[in-house]
Amino acid sequence: MSSFDPQLAEIRFGYGLSPQVAAPQSVAEMLDGLGTPDTMTTRFPVEPFHVFRNRMVAVQEQIRIRQANRGTDLAAAARKRRNELNKDARVAMFQWLGQTMLRRTHTTTAFRERVVAFWADHFTAMGKRGVVRRATSPYIEDAIRPFVSGRFEDLLQSAVMHPLMVDYLDQRLSMGPNSERAIKAGKNKPRGLNENLAREVLELHTLGVDGPYTQQDVTELAELFAGLTFDSKNGLKFRKDFMEPGPETVLGKAYPDVPNINAIRAVLRDLAAHPSTARHLAGKLAVHFVADTPDPALVDALTQAYLDTGGDLMVLYEVLLTHPSAWRDPLNNFKPPADYVSSAMRALAVPADAFDGQSEKDMRRMFAAPFIRMGQQWERPLGPDGWPEEDPEWITPQGLAARVNWAMRIPAQLVKVLPDPRDFAETALGAFVTEPVRFAAAAAESRPEAIGIVLMSPAFQRR
Amino acid sequence: MVSSVSRRDFLARAGVIGCSLAASPLFTPVSFAQTPWDTRLVVIILRGGMDGLDVVQPYGDPGFAALRGSLSGGPQAGALDLDGYFALHPALASLMPLWQAGQLSFVHAISTPYRDKRSHFDGQDLLEAGTESLAGVRDGWLNRMLQVIPGVTAQTAYSVGRNDMRLMRGDAEVANWAPDADLGLSPQAVRLMDLVTESDPAIHAALAEAQLLSDAADDMGGPRGGNHIEIARFAADRLSQDARIAAFSLNGWDTHFHQERAILPGLKRLAETLTTLRGKMRGDTWRKTAVIAMTEFGRTARQNGTGGTDHGTGGLMVLAGGAIRGGRVFGQWPGLGDGDLYQGRDLMPTADVRAQAAWIMRGLTGIDTTTFEQSIFPGLDMGSDPGLLL
């Protein structure tokens, strides 16, 4: 096989085969799917960040009340209310986890869900403490999802200048060492730069760690970013009093001193257009969708398409999906845990109302806790580089033990009646079913074990 | 004593599986030989770039207070004086008995050969590869050490926890386990799982190891404390038996913001991990143990603009155990004055972290320096013995 195949398309570029959703019949259909209205967002809604911000404002208000009334009943009530607000957000996060899984289960354009997840990982962001820890899905909904079929530079701006990213990479209070605010703070309370966001923009989001940047570029970019901050009530803002006076030079280009985000927008546009960015993104796409060590010709083709079109993501997807090396057998990349579970849900045709009435505890037991044991805590990668792509990171004894436990026990809790395992082997694996899997599906002691064994087959765990 | 059994026989005896796996190719024969050495090594990777200057504070250096506004610490701020020059972060107070017993020491101002880009991810990869550069390196230094020792079995070295440990990757067999994983399968399910995964060696081998190790973990009882404590308990248990080496990670050292608060959870985990290892090792195991905790790089000497520190260069190594020479801060102190810093911003590294590890492992295993310099840490100049072991 070295050209489009409907089943391989669904497995490699989607969330696996579904007994109730037809596989795409052409590359054109997959690409067109990205252009059609995004029905999953209305069918399985997730709170967007601009709404989530109200939760942050409400929590801050309770903190303010508490601090202003220390030792009184008012403070105790505020503390209680804050805890309730935090709990509400936590419960909501588990609901959004369910919604995300259901989108992947029911979508007719699974490739869209895959590219959303890919870019959400590329632009990993998460809150560190308090209510904002629950804000990752809302961030993805606002900052990533609407931008996945446009130009990379717009996606880059949207993600890097998003309040959650500004918070996650410690940009919020970074200020120029010679800024008005730093000088006002004086010697006793020194204030200044935090270079975290600047470094990760260069290393992770754009040029890549092998890119042609130096410590000096990191520092100057941090000085250029100084002033980029946010507040919960109004979202992103630029603080002139945090600005470092004078122009900054990044990769040999000087950016003028302007008291707004225009210089930040300009440098991000230039970084997006850099050839190193093209190659970095091309390599990541090829590794994620095709193989840990992809065909260099595919990476070259993606790089060229990026440079030719100024980072038009639809053209990149088209090059990816029409390249012969994207359709080669056998199934290759190992599915990371959340993708593995998503594809199991799709194969089981878990109904759209499966999580109605499920408690937070149920969602933890069925998803959040197993994800941790499989090595992929929901929306909590270890760092801003997101989840690893290399298969050996996931094919570990402890990770597979957790998959066995999930595959044997949880499916029976997600559907009313487990399918006949012999049929399930055929519908879940399609043309990739093997004789040993057929035999095992028929020979297992119980239906849950038989379903679990099919889900543990290499053909189901790879794509 | 050498008894040659197959892993399958071991499993069958342990009652884990039935005899239907007889033909399975994955249960290769292994030799349960006594390893050629009796000492124990624990390697902890402190991920995120631990700020050595905050953990072991050079309050005696006149440059220190000037660089560190709110992080200037020292005994005045509650840090515990170690030797009149360095002081220990107060969050590690529970380790002072180890220091006083001569079972805790530090090596300051060390680094890997990694410079300038200050990426966590490349920094950690290089720390675990143990090489000069990452080009073409696929295995880690601890695995390469196992490769040169005769008599190593699949139970000699454990990679513990959910993080894949690159320093343990390579051709030598290493056991991987997270203490909270368990596998309760019917014998029939084990047999069928074996059948369907046979065509995929990577998945097949990992599942077989899961099966082998879940039995060992069953004896450990339920979870208590945080995951790091579980990991330390598991490692202590294994090391009190046949295992000689354990490696795992402690995360959470990337303290860009409000470090006074941000560093506390990491320090608490480090302290609890070391005290759990000591407390849970049986017999005289702790007396024979060297624990090495290392990080990918130190942090900026100067506090940053948001009460934290950014990625730097020279860092700190933490040593513990009955086998090490404790109660000292080792290393050649480069100073913090004008012109002393690396690129004007980071603690200047004065020694290679790999050389410290190599001298410790040389003392524990008797492997010669040439093997360290050529195979385990290719290209390393070990220099003279810093005397980190008793």
Image (cartoon, helix red, strand yellow):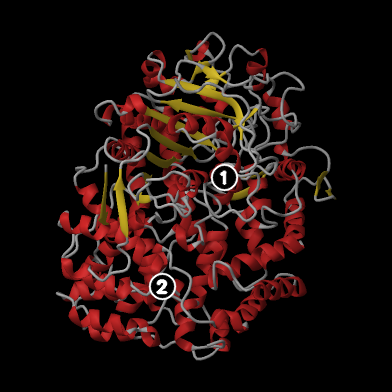
Question: As rendered, which of A53 and B216 lies closer to the eye?
Answer: B216
Quadrant in which residue B98 is drawn: top left
Q: Is residue A189 left or right of residue A307?
A: left
Q: Residue at x 65, y 68 (%)?
A: A282
Residue underneath mark 1: B375
Which residue, given by chain and number where applicable, does mark 2 sit on?
A: A103
Q: What element carries label 2?
A: helix
Which structural element holds mark 1? helix
| Place of residue B225 in the rendered image (x, y in percent of width and height, measured from the top left) | 28, 36
Residue at the outermost top position:
B84
Mark 1 nearby-residue class (10 Å; few <14, some 14–19, many ≥20):
some
Q: In this view, does A385 lie above or below B229?
A: below
Report x, y in % for residue A317. 61, 77
Q: Can residue A92 be seen in this view?
A: no
Neighbours of disc 2 within 10 Å: few (<14), some (14-19), many (20+): many
**Do the residues indicated by labels 2 and 1 lie within the same chain of the protein?**
no
Identified by mark 1, the residue type is Ser
Proximity of marks 2 and 1: CB atoms separated by less than 8 Å: no
Q: Which of A23 and B237 is in front in this view?
A: B237
In terms of depth relative to the viewer, which is nearer, A350 or A302? A302
Q: Mark 2 lies on which chain?
A: A
Quadrant of the frame with the C terminus of chain A = bottom left
Between the C-alphas of marks 2 and 1, the distance is 51 Å
Task: Please name the amino acid that badge 2 sits on.
Answer: Arg
Q: Nearer the viewer, residue B39 or A267?
A: B39
